Image: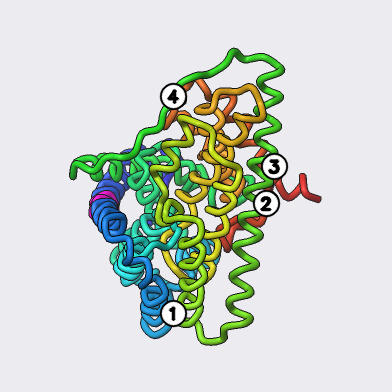
């Protein structure tokens, strides 16, 4: 199945074949991934409400960790890499991603959140989307190039549907696996997948949390300078998050040889910290993010979330890093509003996307996400923060398997 660029040299029917093929494939992928995300988000809300109304359930977090560890150790070794596996398959294909990845990550993420682990949700949606889309390459015998596009479509669909940001989902899927470059031949299918997935999720009546940047100051050199300073701080925070996450992963592997025991001990540590710091740091932390847009947060808020999230994920719990990075960035920006004369909601919004931009090495996707979420008024400030955060954060982000090419490698050299 050859991918043809519209207007190529393969005859007048090539553009029609190209559009028809990808419209059909992406409609199916988007509908399936969006529906799966709708189910996941509904279930995630349910387990979050149950945890918040039955606070003592967090004492079972270590037991849940052991269950997740045993599940992946004995039945899911081929998919334990998660997002990294999908990125590696794009770079160096070795086999079809097992469809079992979808139910495994769904169940393990819900367990993580039910019992109070500090984790996100994008990893779940991306893995579900990637696992679903890759089955089509097997069923239709697609070549390597088309399979890459399908995997990108799965990432785009999963990200778009879980956050309600189809433009950011499209560019994230193109940007995340190749630093400093994008594969534009996948742009059209990725965009369609993102749109179809978002529409499918909305069709089931599943909405998304809305945050508002209520004040945007006049553009001038002083305000741009402060945005740049904030961007540097966001980038350093993203770098610390990535380094801490990788370091803790190595320490768990070094000192605990039997993998299922890592989330058990990690759960014990996270539980102890939650008892000391409070359960506001459990799960996604959406109420805290919302508060960050309204009033300045204490300086320790983003630090505690960073520590708890890195401990949760490095120990082997599942879910993802993105929403915790939103939490870290928004609360850091909110804290900075007490130190520089910029509106709290603007700094929270800048941090919301910029820390993620630095940690995931996806500045363009995060700029678009900021515009989709907050409108065009703060776009310049968001762009400054995201670009600076990306440049300062370094090339080693949260996703293993990313290929380092382009401007960031040259910058660091």
User: Label 1's element?
Assistant: helix
Outermost residue, right side: 413
- The residue labelled by disc 1 is 77
State which tag comes first along the sequence, 3 or 1.
1
| Viewer-side label of 3, 2 | 3
Q: Is the residue marked by circle 2 packed among few (<14), some (14-19), or many (20+) residues within 10 Å?
A: few
Q: Residue at x 60, y 43 (%)?
A: 299
CB within 8 Å, label 4 to label 2: no
Q: Main secondary structure of the magenta part?
A: helix
- The residue labelled by disc 4 is 375
Outermost residue, front side: 276
Circle on res. 391: 3
Q: CA distance from mark 4 to mark 1?
A: 42 Å
State which tag comes first along the sequence, 3 or 4.
4
User: Label 3's element?
Assistant: helix
Q: Position of residue 412 (x, y in %)?
A: 77, 49
Is 283 situated left or right of 221 in this image? left
Q: Is the residue marked by circle 1 packed among few (<14), some (14-19), or many (20+) residues within 10 Å?
A: few
Chosen colour scheme: rainbow
Q: Position of residue 63 (x, y in %)?
A: 37, 77
Q: CA distance from mark 3 to mark 4?
A: 24 Å
Outermost residue, left side: 204
Q: CA distance from mark 4 to mark 2?
A: 31 Å
User: Label 4's element?
Assistant: loop
| Viewer-side label of 4, 1 | 4
Q: CA distance from mark 3 to mark 1?
A: 35 Å
Q: Residue at x 67, y 22 (%)?
A: 224
Q: CA distance from mark 3 to mark 2?
A: 13 Å
Q: State which region is magenta.
A: 32-39
Q: Nearer the viewer, residue 93 or 15?
A: 93
Q: Position of residue 8 (x, y in %)?
A: 45, 40
């Amino acid at each position: 199945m050859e991918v043809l660029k519209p207007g190529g040299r393969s005859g007048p029917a090539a553009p029609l074949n190209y559009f028809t093929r990808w419209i059909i494939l992406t409609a199916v992928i988007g509908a399936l991934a969006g529906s799966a995300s709708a189910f996941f988000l509904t279930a995630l809300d349910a387990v979050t409400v149950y945890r918040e109304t039955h606070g003592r359930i967090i004492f079972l977090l270590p037991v849940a960790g052991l269950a997740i560890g045993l599940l992946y150790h004995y039945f899911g070794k081929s998919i334990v890499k998660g997002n990294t596996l999908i990125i590696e398959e794009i770079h160096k294909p070795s086999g079809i991603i097992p469809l079992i990845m979808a139910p495994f990550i769904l169940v393990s993420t819900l367990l993580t959140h039910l019992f109070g682990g500090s984790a996100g949700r994008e990893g779940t949606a991306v893995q579900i989307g990637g696992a679903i889309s890759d089955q089509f390459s097997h069923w239709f015998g697609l070549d390597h190039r088309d399979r890459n596009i399908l995997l990108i479509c799965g990432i785009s669909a999963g990200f778009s549907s879980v956050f309600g940001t189809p433009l950011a989902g499209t560019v994230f899927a193109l940007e995340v696996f190749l630093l400093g470059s994008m594969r534009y031949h996948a742009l059209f299918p990725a965009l369609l997948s993102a749109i179809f997935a978002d529409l499918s999720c909305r069709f089931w009546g599943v909405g998304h949390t809305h945050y508002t940047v209520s004040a945007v100051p006049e553009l001038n050199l002083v305000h741009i300078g402060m945005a740049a300073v904030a961007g540097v701080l966001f980038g350093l925070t993203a770098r610390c998050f990535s380094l801490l996450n990788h370091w803790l992963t190595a320490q768990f592997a070094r000192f605990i040889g039997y993998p299922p025991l890592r989330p058990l001990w990690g759960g014990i540590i996270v539980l102890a910290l939650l008892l000391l710091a409070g359960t506001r740091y459990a799960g996604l932390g959406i109420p805290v993010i919302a508060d960050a847009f309204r009033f300045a947060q204490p300086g320790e808020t983003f630090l505690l979330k960073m520590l708890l999230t890195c401990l949760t994920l490095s120990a082997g719990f599942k879910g993802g890093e993105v929403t915790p990075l939103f939490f870290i960035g928004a609360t850091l920006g909110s804290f900075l509003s007490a130190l520089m004369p910029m509106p709290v909601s603007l700094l929270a919004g800048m941090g919301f996307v910029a820390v993620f931009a630095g940690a995931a090495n996806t500045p363009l996707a995060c700029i678009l996400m900021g515009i989709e979420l907050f409108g065009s008024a703060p776009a310049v400030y968001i762009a400054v923060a995201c670009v600076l955060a990306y440049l300062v954060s370094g090339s080693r982000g949260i996703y293993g398997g990313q290929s380092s090419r382009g401007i960031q490698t040259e910058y660091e050299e």
